[in-house]
């Protein structure tokens, strides 16, 4: 879709998704790199190959393989445009390794951020459900923009928290709570 306003929103989304992945990978890679039962599935990858929104985000730079999807020898080949579930799924190995409930909660919210951005912004449904470019034009852009802002505010808190630069104060928890509503 060639539309400067939507193109700018997509770039904001990519940049935001990259940030979330950077923090998430730091937390998850120690577990995923030695996992005996990796959770990636071609059926999940397929969403990124079929959703016009996710296709617009990753730009089809990586070919979808019918057998392996986007999974390569060194993990997922998609730098951006992964299905929201790929960010949100946190297995028991990762959760059990967290030192306390607050850290588990923070990780859980971090995983939900990418999915939150597209929630209900297309005809009250998730943007990944849009079926074609004509559908994408019906995106509620103001809501999409507001969601990126709310998710970015939550991410700023979580990024500092996982870097060990701050604890979660009551005001921070209220910002994170918006994501869970
Ligand atoms: S999220 Fe859990 S199940 Fe999936 S690859 Fe990582 S460690 Fe394995
Ligand atoms: S993380 Fe990548 S390889 Fe794994 S299921 Fe998602 S899209 Fe597929």
Image (cartoon, rainbow, N blue to C red):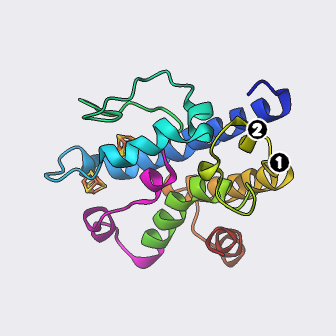
Comparing 65 with 7, the one in front is 65
Q: Which residue occupies 69% across, 52% down?
A: 152
Identify the magenta region. Answer: 83-102
The reply to whether residue 160 is visible in this rendering is no
Judging by the rendered image, the residue that carries numbered circle 2 is 9
- Label 1 SS: helix
Comparing 11 with 67, the one in front is 67
* Residue 133 percent coordinates (x, y): 70, 35
Main SS type for the magenta part? helix
Looking at the rendering, the quadrant in which ligand 1 lies is bottom left
The reply to whether residue 131 is visible in this rendering is yes
Residue 140 located left or right of residue 40: right
| Disc marking residue 141 | 1
- Dot 1 alpha-carbon crowd within 10 angstroms: few under 14, some 14 to 19, many 20 or more: some
* Residue 32 percent coordinates (x, y): 26, 48
Q: Is ligand 2 less than 8 Å from the beta carbon at label 2?
A: no
């Amino acid at each position: 879709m060639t539309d400067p306003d939507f193109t700018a929103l997509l770039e904001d989304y990519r940049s935001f998704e990259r940030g979330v992945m950077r923090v998430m990978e730091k937390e998850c890679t120690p577990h995923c790199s030695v996992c005996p039962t990796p959770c990636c599935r071609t059926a999940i990858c397929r969403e990124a190959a079929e959703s016009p929104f996710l296709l617009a985000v990753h730009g089809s730079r990586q070919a979808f393989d019918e057998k392996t999807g986007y999974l390569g020898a060194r993990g997922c080949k998609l730098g951006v445009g992964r299905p929201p579930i790929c960010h949100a799924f946190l297995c028991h190995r990762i959760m059990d390794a967290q030192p306390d409930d607050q850290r588990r909660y923070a990780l859980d919210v971090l995983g939900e951020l990418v999915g939150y951005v597209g929630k209900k912004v297309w005809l009250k449904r998730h943007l990944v459900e849009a079926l074609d470019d004509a559908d994408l034009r019906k995106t509620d852009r103001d809501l999409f923009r507001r969601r990126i802002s709310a998710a970015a505010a939550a991410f700023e808190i979580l990024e500092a928290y996982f870097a060990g630069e701050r604890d979660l104060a009551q005001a921070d928890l209220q910002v994170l709570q918006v994501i869970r509503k």
